[in-house]
Image (cartoon, rainbow, N blue to C red):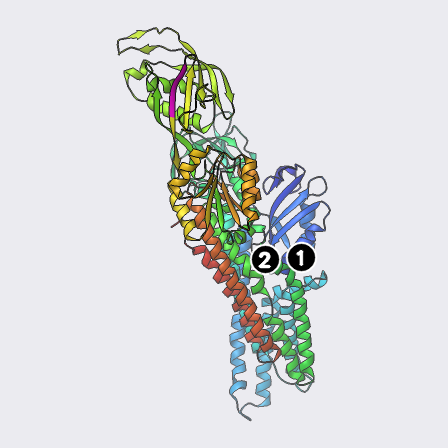
Amino acid sequence: MLDDPLEWGAFSQVLEGDSSIWVSHVVVYGMHCAACSGSVEDALLRVPGVVGARVSAATQRATVQWHAGQTVPSRWMQSVRSSGYQMVPANDVFASQRRKVENRAALWRWLVAGLCMMQIMMYAYPAYIARAGDLSAEMEGLLRWASWVLTLPVVLFSCGPFFRSAWQDVAHRRIGMDLPVALGIAVTFVLSTVGTFEPAGVFGREVYFDSLTMFVFFLLSGRWLELRLRDRTAGALESAMNRLPDSVERQLADGTFERVAVRRIVVGDLLRMQAGESFAADGVVEFGAGHVDEAILSGESRPLWRQTGDTVLAGSQNLSATLGVRVQRVATHTRFAQIVALMESASASKPHIALVADRLAKPFLVAVLLCALGAALWWWERDPQRALMVAVAVLVVTCPCALSLATPAAMLASAGRLARSGVLVRNLQALEALSKVDTVVFDKTGTLSRDALLVQHIECRPGVSPAQALLWAQALAQHSQHPASRAVCKGASSVAAQPSAAMASEGVWVCEGVTESPGQGLSGTVRRVSRGLVDGAGAADQEAQAMDLRLGSAAFCGLDPLAGDDTALAMSDEQGWLATLALQEQLRSDAQACVQALFAMGIKVHMLSGDAPSAVLRVAQSLGIEQARGGCSPDGKLDSLRALQARGQRVAMVGDGLNDGPVLAAAQVSFAFGRAVPLAQARSDFVVLGEQLMAVAATVGLARQTMAVVRQNLVWALLYNAACVPLAVAGLLPAWLAGLGMASSSLLVVSNALRLTRAKFALAD
């Protein structure tokens, strides 16, 4: 079924720039370590047609790039299955159910191991405290037999995942972290069994059923808790990415509604969305009104009011009333799908430090096996009965789970915290790079300032009123999408809404033959075509009037420069200067706070903008930015950025994502800011969904905190191995204590990383 191209869009997107390459997001089951993720990647890359694969053991997710003309999803999924792992689409509706089954099975294995361990400890206790002659041989043998019987469920049931994983590793000629553990369990059980049935043999009469069950119990405790902690991240990710409903009510030709699968809706359909449902597509409200939760899309935690004519987005939730929505965008074209693609990309990406750990995982495991063998041989000559248990302790205590989890656990926890606050991380390596940034470069328009401008003041030649000039300017400006044109239209609309006879008498003005000169202005013929009321004294036909007007820069209007006021629009007619419209730029309310927060962190702040130098200077002075440059072309911005980098500065670029592509791509780290960012094509490392600029400073602070946690985790993992391996080789670390140490080290690393999920963040607190 997954080989049907109609199904691919549910869990895949076409690679930008190459329509024959698909990028699929899948969930992988059965992975426990970094070595496992490497095995899955190897299995995928062996399939002809698979051109790239990234697998994260920490999130159990993978991103696969494949050529549609050379392979199909079932083929590379089968290759993974043959390697001993399971793979399903990331949007699979049973993913959460599979996690519940996995958690339930892990809980049962842990309970069986715990109950058997406690009973075996009761049977072993008399042997520990008994003095010579207190226990008869028959009683001691009976207690050993009972311990052996109770150990069987632990070995055959509770240890099942260790043995299955180890067998798959051996069968596929690879090595994973479960192989040393399985060897340790098997050796301990065999050694204790021989001691029970052949007490006079070479291995002596010592049994270790209590140690065996104890360290199995500790290992399973650590793995179960690690699974629960990891599910807090994976579950949150899935709940965010699976916000779309499975089905929706669609209107039929006769006006009735039927429930259909979401994948069957198309542009133009009318959907009826009930309260509590998530919107299945982007669209416009046609009937009804109510509150909508768009937190996942914009970071805005407050419900938003939506009524007829308003836009609603896929993935947002209808909170209070039934709404009729006319579909405008579906599937991968929705904003929600673009956000999900970014989250999927981040969940499968690997930071540089994690890649190093993954590459070292297999050689490290080989070294563990050789170290255990060497310890066993060294002890065999001195104490054969103790040699194998020393090898078991070495096998268990040196398992590098904590080392492989140290980086991805912290990175993913941080990425989840950012996502909940309206900042999406496109790749986890960006967090590492952002923590080292010492310079932040801002674009101005759409970043430090809002896209919208305001008409602040209008100067006119004698005989022309400001209201007249504004209506004439609107007739031209409504044919352009330039921010200055939008400001003129907004100003004219607010004035026209005033119920004054003077305004009504101006009539309705339209423009014909409009020509726009990019970056300069608009020209056309403005004509009044309506009737008006004169001083409220009845209707009168107005003499048709027409005039050729220009609106834009002073040079475009054939005028002298406007006294250095580069934020003003000039308007002229056949007689020359007609009016000057002074525009005011709106800085974001938190721009000052963001810049000051960056200064407080010791970060230099620069501003590069294509706007006129005087306008850039005014904004820079108001914010306290000393290094600012205006009149920059895209190439000029790029040259300035590279000059900073040439001086050894690590630069983060913050732009609106619309025309800053080259400079965003060239910076060490980049932010695309603004809700209008084309997410699917953004070249940035971070995408800010909301409207708060403080997200930039808060993200820098969280990145530094994240890397501090990563360093803490790595130091702990390395110190743990450096301290425990010599103790195990020296025979001073029993098997049960080795299991406890291994489990505790992994739990400590994951728990330390989870502190980042509760880290303070400016947008949320």
The amino acid type found where label 1 is placed reads: Ser
SS state under label 2 = helix
> In the image shown, does 370 or 216 lie closer to the viewer?
370
Q: Please report the residue visible at 60 percent of the width from the left and 48 percent of the height from the top.
A: 26
SS state under label 1 = helix
Judge whether 415 appears above or below 477 on screen: below
Judge whether 586 appears above or below 529 on screen: below
Drawn side of residue 18 relative to residue 420, left or right: right
Q: Earlier in the sequence, mark 2 or mark 1?
A: 1
Which circle marks residue 354 in the picture?
2
Q: Residues within 10 Å of mark 2 (few under 14, many from 20)?
A: many
The amino acid type found where label 2 is placed reads: Ala
Identify the magenta region: 575-581
Judge whether 428 appears above or below 548 on screen: below
Please provide percent x and percent y for residue 49. Answer: 71, 44
Q: Residues within 10 Å of mark 1 (few under 14, many from 20)?
A: many
Residue 577 shown in magenta: yes
Please provide percent x and percent y for residue 314. Answer: 49, 38
Would residue 370 be visible to someone looking at this image?
yes
Q: CA distance from mark 2 to mark 1?
A: 16 Å
**Dot in front, 2 or 1:** 2
> In the image shown, does 435 or 531 lie closer to the viewer?
435
Residue 84 shown in magenta: no
Drawn side of residue 16 relative to residue 608, left or right: right
Tell me the residue that label 1 is attached to: 39
Please provide percent x and percent y for residue 127. Answer: 54, 86
Q: Quadrant of residue 146?
A: bottom right
